[in-house]
Image (cartoon, rainbow, N blue to C red):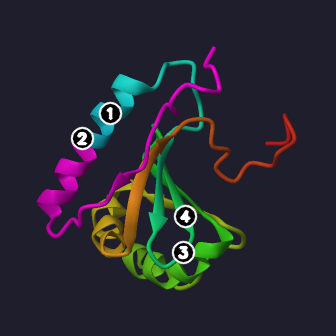
Amino acid sequence: MQDQSDAPRFRPVPWSALETPADVELWIAEHNLSLQENVARHETGYGVCFTLAAGGEVYLQTTQDGALVLDVSPEAEWIAPLIMAAARLTEAPPGRLWVLPDDKLVQLMLGLSSLIASSILVVGHRFGRPQRMGAW
């Protein structure tokens, strides 16, 4: 059990822009390794949170069945056109949850990269699920 005076488990990391597909692939490999080293098998809701320089957060999770799940905070709704362009969508989904095929990750990260101020690993994020237990 973590004492409240202990340092937080994860800390924000200043973002370094990803400029090429190779940069994104390297970030993906490092991110996956960090998750493997820092997240226990029983933990859920893990992924990464990107704090956007112009406001808001985008939470990213990949699923084992090949999907990207983006949970876009209300303050970051302005990012919708970029997500739509990267995923080649004609309209945004209702609400704040986006589900995209994993082959869109490199293009999405290249588009988002210059807008990100920091990133942090997250555990226990609800990724669009209602707050009531058993509601999803």
Residue 33 appears left or right of 65: left
Over which residues does the magenta segment extend? Answer: 1-29
Label 2 sits on what residue type? Glu
Q: CA distance from mark 3 to mark 2?
A: 25 Å
Q: Which mark is residue 55?
A: 3
Could you tell whether 121 is left or right of 97 in the image?
Answer: left
For label 3, the SS is loop
Residue 19 belongs to the span the image colors magenta:
yes
Whether residue 70 can be seen here: yes
Q: Examine the structure image and report whether residue 16 is included in the region drawn in magenta.
A: yes
Residue 109 occupies which quadrant of the picture? bottom left
> Where 77 sits versus 72, above or below?
below
- Amino acid on which disc 1 is placed: Ser
Q: Earlier in the sequence, mark 1 or mark 4?
A: 1
Q: Which residue is mark 2?
A: 30
**Separation of disc 1 and disc 4 at Cα?**
20 Å
